[in-house]
Image (spheres, coloured by chain):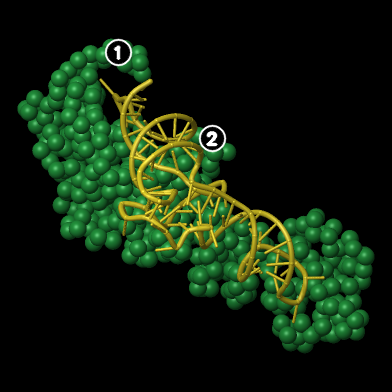
Chain colours: A green, B yellow
Amino acid sequence: MDNVRARFAPSPTGSTHIGTARTALFNWLFARKTGGAFVLRIEDTDKERNTQEALEELVDGLKWLGLDWDEGPGKEGPFGPYFQSQRGELYQSHIQILKDKGRAYEKDGAVYFKLLGERYTEFDSYHDAEVEKVKTEPVIIDDLIRGQVTRKEERDFVIQRSNGDPSFHFVNVVDDIAMKITHVIRGEDHLSNTSKHVELFKAFEATPPKFAHLPMILKDPKEGKGKMSKRDKGALISEYRDRNFLPEAVVNFIALLGWSPKDDQETLPLDSLISRFNLDDVQKGGARFDEKKMSHLNFEYMKSMPLSQYVKTAKVSLSNTGLIEPSSDESYLESAMKLCQEKIDSFENLPGFAAFFFTDDYEISEKAEKKVMKKDGAVERLAEIAPRLSGIQSWDESSIDSAFNQIAEEQGIKPFAWYPIVRFAVSGTNSGPDFLPMIETLGKERVLKRIENALAKYS
RNA sequence: GCCCCGUUCGUCUAGCCAGGCCUAGGACACAAGGUUUUCAUCCUUGCGACAGGGGUUCGAAUCCCCUACGGGGUGCCA
C-alpha cells in the first residue's frame, strides 16, 4: 500500500472518550504500520457545541497516549488548515460545484444534496409524515473489516444548514477528498451514514477511500444498555491520567478492545503494537470494557518499569497526597518504592499502601488490629522482641532475621509468630511489602519507636 | 416501523475467509492449594463458551437459511 493517508477527525465537543481514543489509536497504528501519514483534522463546524477546553483536552490526551500526528494543529502540512472552521471557502466552492452539476438545491434556507433516481412520496412511520423518497442505485461500501456492505440512501439530505454552516457529511467528504485521504477508520456508528458519504464522493467524481468500521465499545450491562457513553465509569481518558495510570498500559488495553495479535502475547508496548497491527484482525462484534483487565495491564507495566522511573512517577502521587516533600530523602524513597513496585497494581493505590513509610500518622486497620493484637500473648511477643531488635548493631535484613530466629529457637516456635504483630505495630495493618526488607528499610529508629508506641497503647 | 451491522467461557479474545489437527486455546476475573505460614505479589490446579433451530457434508464453531437477542442509523449533531 503506498501513500497511505489516514485521518482522525474528532469534533471537540466534550471530554475525550475511550472509544474516540481507540479510533485515534487504530488510525495512528495503521499509518505507522504502513509508513503512511496520520492526519489530525478538527471537525469544529458545530459552533454551538465546540469548546476550546475540549480541544485542549483532546490534544493533551493524544500526546499523553504517545500518538503524534504528521499533519494537523501545530503541525501544518500541504493540506491545511486542519480546522474545519477555517476551511469555509473550500466548502462554499464545493457547494457551488454540486449546484452547478444540478446535485444540490436550496430549501427552507438550507442546501440539500440531490440523490439520483425516480422520486415518490411515501408515509414514513418513523417521521410520522409523508416524505419524498428516491429510488437510488445501491451503494457498495468497501469495508476492510466487514467486507462489502450494501446500502441505499433514499432521502436527500442537508449539506449546508440554514445558518450557513456546512454539515458533517459534507465537510467530511470534501476534506477527505482535498486531503487525499486513502483510509477512513472510524466507529461503527458511522457505517449507516457511509452510504451518504459514498454518494457524495461519486457526485464529486472522486474514488471513495477504503473504509474500516470499528466495533463499538459497549456499556457494562450493569450500567445500562448501548454503547459506552461519556458518563460511564472509566469512559474518559482524562480519568486514567488523573488516576496516574500509565499511558502505555492504557494504550495497550484499548488496542486489545476489538483487536488481537492472534497469539498469546498481550503485553504489547506501542512499538510492538505497530509491528503487529493489522486492520484485518479487527473484531466485528462490540467489546465491553473491563476495569480489572486494565488494572492488570497497568500492573504489568508498573512492574517492568526501571526503578528510577518508578520512583519518579511514584513521587507525583506521593507528593500529591502530602506524604513526601520535594526535599525528602531520595535513597529512602527509593528503597521503599522498590518494595512497593512488586506489590501494587496502580499508583492510585500507592499512597494508601506506602503511607507508613513516610508518616507516623498512618491509618490503623481495625480488622488487622482485631486479628493481630487482640490475640493472647501479642503484647508479650512485642515486648520481648523489642530489646532484641534494639540490640542489633548493624541494621540489615540478615541481622533482623537472626534476631527473630534466635528468640524463636529459644521458645521452640517459628519466627512467624512475631511477624504479623511487629508488622502491625510498625505499619498499622497486616498486609504490605515483604516483611524483613520492610523492617530494614523503615530503619531501626522508626521500628523501635513504633513498637514502643504500640506497647503503650495495647498494654 | 424501516435499513445496516453483529452474536465463542462472567469479560477481552484465538480458531471462522481457505470445513477434519477443537475432547474449542490464551488472558482477566473467580475458587482451591502452595510459595520457610504478612501479602493486594509469585507459582500450580480448578471453574467456565461455539445464542437456538434447520440444512449442505463422510465430517461444521467454521458454509447456507430461518428465528432470537444485541448494537448502530434513520437530525438543518458529529
Position of residue A275 measured from the top left corner of the image (x, y, whole percent): 33, 65
Q: What residue is at 44 percent from the left and 58 percent from the top? A: A252
Type of residue at label 1? Phe
Q: Chain of mark 1?
A: A
Q: Closer to the camera: disc 2 or disc 1?
A: 1
Specify the quadrant of the image occupied by residue A54. Answer: top left
The kind of secondary structure element at disc 2 is loop
Q: How many marks?
A: 2
Q: What residue is at 76 percent from the left and 64 percent from the top? A: A430
Which mark is drawn over residue A371?
none
Q: Dot 2 surroundings within 10 Å: few (below 14), some, or many (20 or more)?
A: few
Q: Dot 1 surroundings within 10 Å: few (below 14), some, or many (20 or more)?
A: few
Type of residue at label 2? Gly
On-image quarter of the N terminus of chain A: bottom left
Left or right: residue A260 versus residue A279 is right
Query: What distance separates the C-alpha of mark 2 from that of mark 1?
Result: 33 Å
Left or right: residue A382 versus residue A35 is right
Q: Which of A408 and A224 lies nearest the eye of the viewer?
A: A224
Q: Which residue is mark 1?
A: A123
List the single residue furthest toward the left.
A100
Q: Which of A200 and A391 lies nearest the eye of the viewer?
A: A200
Vertical order, A95 against A265 (above or below): above
Left or right: residue A128 versus residue B60 is left
Q: Which residue is mark 2?
A: A224
Position of residue A421 measured from the top left corner of the image (x, y, whole percent): 82, 68
The kind of secondary structure element at disc 1 is strand
Q: Would residue A149 be seen by someone viewing this image from the given angle? A: yes
Vertical order, A451 against A165 (above or below): below
